[in-house]
Image: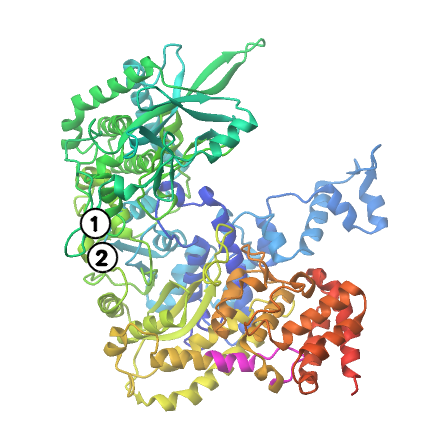
Amino acid sequence: MSDKSFIEVQFPVSKISKESYKERKANLGQTLTGLGKWWGRKPLILVRATILGLLLPATNDPVKDRNIFLKLLTMDDEGLYKRKVKSISTKDIYNFLEDKEKHTYFELDAKRSPRYVKEITKDQKDELQKRYFETLSYDEKIALCCRPEEVYNAISKKEWEEINAHLGTNAYSLQSLMDELGQKKFGHTPIVGDCFAGGGSIPFEAARIGCEAYASDLNPVACLLNWANLNILSKSDEEIEKLRELQQKVYDEVDKQIQEWGIETNEDGHRAVSYLYCTETECPECGYTVPLSPNWIIGKGTKTIAILKDNGNKGFNIEVKQNASSEEIKVCESTSTIKNGKMICQNCRSETSMSVIRKDRVDTEGNKIYGLRQWNKSEFKNRKDDILRERLYCIRYLRRIIDEKGKVKEERYYSTPNDRDNDRELKVIRLLEERFDMYQQKGYIPSAKIESGEKTDEPIRSRGWSYWHQLFNARQLLLHGLICESINNLACSQKEYAIGLLGMNKCADWNSKLGVWHSGAGVENSQNTFLNQALNPLYNYGTRGLLNLGNSWKFNISSCNFNPGIKSIKTIDARTLESKSDLWITDPPYADAVNYHELSEFFLSWDKKIIEDIFKEWYADSKRVLAVKGKGENFNQSMIEVYSNLAKNMPDNGMQVVMFTHQDVKVWAELALVLWASGLQVTSAWNIATETESGGLKNGGNYVKGTVLLVLRKQNSEYTAYLDELYPAIEDEVKYQIDSMKDLDDKEDPNFTDADYLLAAYAASLKVLTSYKNIEDIDVQYELSKSDANSPIVTIINEAVKIAFDYLTPSGFDTFTWKTLLPEERFYIKGLDTEKDGVYSLNSYQELGRGFGVKEYSDMMASSKANHARLKTASEFAMKHTNESSKFGQSVLRNVLIALYKSSKEEDATKGKAWLRNEIEGYWNERSKIIEILDYIKTLEHIDNMEHWEEDVKSARILVELVRHDGV
């Protein structure tokens, strides 16, 4: 047995990618997302697999290693069936069986539909379900399964005996196995640390499966989430129920006060659910006050619109109408009073830039000066003379009706605010004014100033909002202040205060002036602030009444019921931590566009006082100046300081995994230099695709990205090498890595695609590079200070990728012919190879594009939908992109595809041959290449998932023979 860990030798990337995708698609059903907003959480199954991969040894039996790994994750055949929660339909099972068995287990009803015979037993039904289940692909199976984390005690005693026999352990649970593996490797229960803990996936999963967890983050909001993950979700159902009782008590107390005030109930006793506000401003051309909105559709399902009518006083009344006609809806959809940053006056039809209306200007030194006045700390509403003012224009009410059967029915309706509604708005303002100073002093509403920053400048610039409370209107502040006051009155324990804080954060996210109104049928509600990673003020937004905010406040808390063991959560700069961990797993803000430090201040403005009170060992500000952020020399130097410190705080046999978003070679090169300079050595790398349908193919294909796991150990070499000495070693390592992956791969259920082999080339080059103490030709500090991509590390990685591409010749192609194809041609053929293997991940095409240096390939794609991506067939291409000057448009392959299209369309392969002879320059010299391409396309026949190629393959069979026997 070697000293290597499983993850250094192999990793089932295909299955883990699919399980990660399944977890992502659970959306709000994910375990941690319910507790609060954070950006870029990694799937828990990915974390579990990573920890397991680090702790499991690589033995002399790699196939058995893989089987044990999958068994522990319930990703083997038995585990999958235990996770099966959806039943296969009677009809599917009936069609699956042979005639004899159909008669044994089924009968047909009067409509000729199959049903089980009365004599069938439950065991027989289960056996039929299992037999059918075993015929399905992995994707089809997991569609019927719950997630691995949702099954408990799924591994049988017999299976544990098999696991123990292979590993030399005596464990009968995942937790006890982690302890034993840690004892073998480190002499104690393994300690897993994350110094960029963020939303908490890594510490939480480490603790749940039996490791000691260390979590730290510079940001106290992140630490609050981590604390809640480990101290609340780990509790039993009974303990969770007590926290739910607190949520209900707070809600009831707030509801009682609101009803006493009468600020959400109209004269008919109907309760307000939503309030819609818009911004209005004066047209500089005609002096009319114009309400601003991109359109005036309120609800598509209820056919509700807002109609602007001249009020005869240089302004507009806004009339709300339900059940509008199709024509009225069409008019409202196209009626914009704000579009592309310009106000469109509905009186004089002039268009005026909002920067002009705000009176923005440029000073003599070229600096932009923003024209809006800055609001002071005591303000929470606009002044009457402000350039931009807010206006309530619609309320959605709920009424309860008792029908003729005595049942209570609820109906929602929209109305134009009347005088009494406006009086209630004024009452809200008066009530808030009476409490405003007290609420701020006690921390019930924010009082902090918004610091200038990339994202936080937007509300300051475009609205003049200088303090965090100004991102909320009077009604929102009063309601949220009441909730915070009730938390303070009713919470007794640290857990109760924490659950109150998290609930308040959800209310802030779902009820601010940055919450867009969603008019879609079945929605018709305001959305959360952080639909994207920004703080963008809106011209038209929604506000939720308490009834509508209830689900945000009373958010679901799920019990995972585990003993988190020893855990530590600290607010600290990663450069100065002194805590030791055996395994550091981190997801650093590398090449990351998310301004965590700025965006989290939105929540921290609400949390500050309670955090200071209940977590006295923590600080309560974002430490923005210390945040590891951005790119460039300073950022890279900060990263070196962080990872040098982590290396110092792990044992000599400790390991690290750095997770980062896979982008281009330059990112790899920079990160490799950072980690190398930190005293770390790359031992392997794996790419996990976690894409979801919200992504798509954009900007030349560089949009949906995978997560790379870069596996590292301490660098202990004292050797120095020269750059030119590395290339032979890199070539050997690339080929060795590809060969070993191919040997390990399951031929019946392939795990690796070409994209994975290409990634192995990246890893192989870095493995060789970082195995030396120094490279004479490389000055790390100098390379990290450069902004261009002409780094020797980039050259090394590109050379490794080229070696891999030349080595990965598709079946049926001559190696020499393959090397003569254009990068675009090789991309297309390798893409077809990927599709043949049943891989539809957009990430795989992006990997091929990066590797071949093909930046623009969107025209080649028939579908760019995540996990349904595929290339166009010859017939789908038809004659598109034939006259263009692009390399692909003029290539031999493109002309072959046109020839196939013509042969299929006209049902005459001679038309295709004529095209090839007439259009391909040097046809006779290119004939062997044409034949190899056509022979390759023939291999797409009789593959279940390649049926869309059927007609073109038929043409290819005929056309290749015509070309093969063509004479002068």
Q: What stretch is highlighted in magenta?
A: 801-815
- Distance from label 1 to label 2 (Cα)? 8 Å
Tell me whether the residue at label 1 lies in contact with that at label 2, contact meaning CB atoms closer than 8 angstroms. yes
| Coloration of the structure image | rainbow
User: Image height check: is 360 above or below 938?
Assistant: above
Query: Quarter-wise, where is residue 501 in the image?
Result: top left
Q: At 21% from the left edge and 26% from the top edge, which residue is drawn?
A: 384
Q: At 50% from the left edge and 69% from the top edge, which residue is drawn?
A: 849
Badge 1: residue crowd in 10 Å (few <14, some 14–19, many ≥20): many
Disc 1 residue type?
A: Ser
Query: Quarter-wise, where is residue 354 in the image?
Result: top left
Q: In this view of the protein, which residue sits in the foreground, 176 or 241?
A: 241
The picture places residue 462, in percent across and down from the top left corner, at 26, 42
User: Image height check: is 911 above or below 332?
Assistant: below
- Disc 2 is placed on an element classified as loop
Q: At 45% from the left edge and 58% from the top edge, which residue is drawn?
A: 46
The picture places residue 851, in percent across and down from the top left corner, at 48, 73
The picture places residue 242, in percent across and down from the top left corner, at 35, 31
Q: Taking 706 as reference, is 515 left or right? A: left
Residue receiving disc 2: 627
Q: In this view of the protein, which residue sits in the foreground, 94 or 936?
A: 936
Q: Taking 62 as reference, is 938 left or right? A: right
Q: In this view of the protein, which residue sits in the foreground, 962 or 233?
A: 962
Query: Quarter-wise, where is residue 440 in the image?
Result: top left
| Quarter of the C terminus within the rendering | bottom right
The picture places residue 914, in percent across and down from the top left corner, at 75, 76
Residue receiving disc 1: 622
Disc 2 residue type?
A: Ala
Q: Earlier in the sequence, mark 1 or mark 2?
A: 1
Badge 2: residue crowd in 10 Å (few <14, some 14–19, many ≥20): many
